[in-house]
Image (cartoon, rainbow, N blue to C red):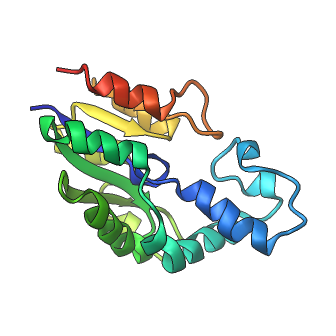
Amino acid sequence: MLTIVWDIDDVLNNLMHEWFHKKWLLEHPNCHCGYKDLTINPPHEILKVTKEEYLCSLDEFRMSEMMNLQPNQEVLSWFEEHGKKYRHLALTAVPGSTADLSAFWLIRHFGKWIRSFNFVPSERASDCSSLYYDRTKYDFLKWLEKADILIDDNSINIKSAQESGITTYLVSRPWNSGGVALTEVLRELTTVK
């Protein structure tokens, strides 16, 4: 049975889209860019704020809205039909202060199939947990040695996993290039043996 490693934010859910529309634009009505203009991640330069301001806003959104964030229905439908054919685990990059929220959200929506929540701490000034082990998703995957497929929206994570011989799918988002639509990723997964 193949093991699929799923990123959570912007793969299993639409965190950036929801944050941008439900928090950023409401608090910054003079913002003249749209979600599709967020062509780099983190997008602080596009938003004309400091990286810390952007991260603070995103973290506040996670803390107040993570439990209300809806799962990607297309992915959820795929799991209902095909989830039992694979072993699944989640690997996300979140600050240690909000990892429990991501874990709870994951188990609530995908716990029938994904029974392993793993995270690599996103760097924050107030958090020293990244000083220990697994600073990157690559570090974690190298330690795990069991991943067959990685699905992520970050091209750096994809590239390092490919170099390790893992089959990868880069989910197309405004901040990456060369990705494929999530619909296509899910279609291809149905044919993987």
Q: Is residue 22 left or right of residue 188?
A: right
Q: Is residue 147 left or right of residue 91?
A: left
In x, y percent, where is residue 12?
40, 50
User: Which residue is painted at 50% across and 49% down in the image?
Assistant: 10
Observer-nearest of 74 and 119: 74
Observer-nearest of 127 and 82: 82
Residue that protrudes farthest toward the left in the picture: 1
The quarter of the picture where the N terminus appears is top left
Observer-nearest of 112 and 179: 112
The quarter of the picture where the C terminus appears is top left
Tell me: residue 59, above or below residue 71.
below
Q: Is residue 126 visible?
A: no
In x, y percent, where is residue 137?
36, 47
User: Which residue is painted at 60% across and 60% down in the image?
Assistant: 18
User: Which residue is painted at 36% across and 31% down in the image?
Assistant: 186
User: Which residue is painted at 52% across and 74% down in the image?
Assistant: 65
In x, y percent, where is residue 111?
21, 60
Total numbered badges shown on the rendered structure = 0
Tell me: residue 37, above or below residue 159.
below
Q: Is residue 39 left or right of residue 3?
A: right
Q: Quadrant of residue 48?
A: bottom right
Q: Is residue 25 visible?
A: yes
Observer-nearest of 93 and 153: 153
In x, y percent, where is residue 115?
17, 57
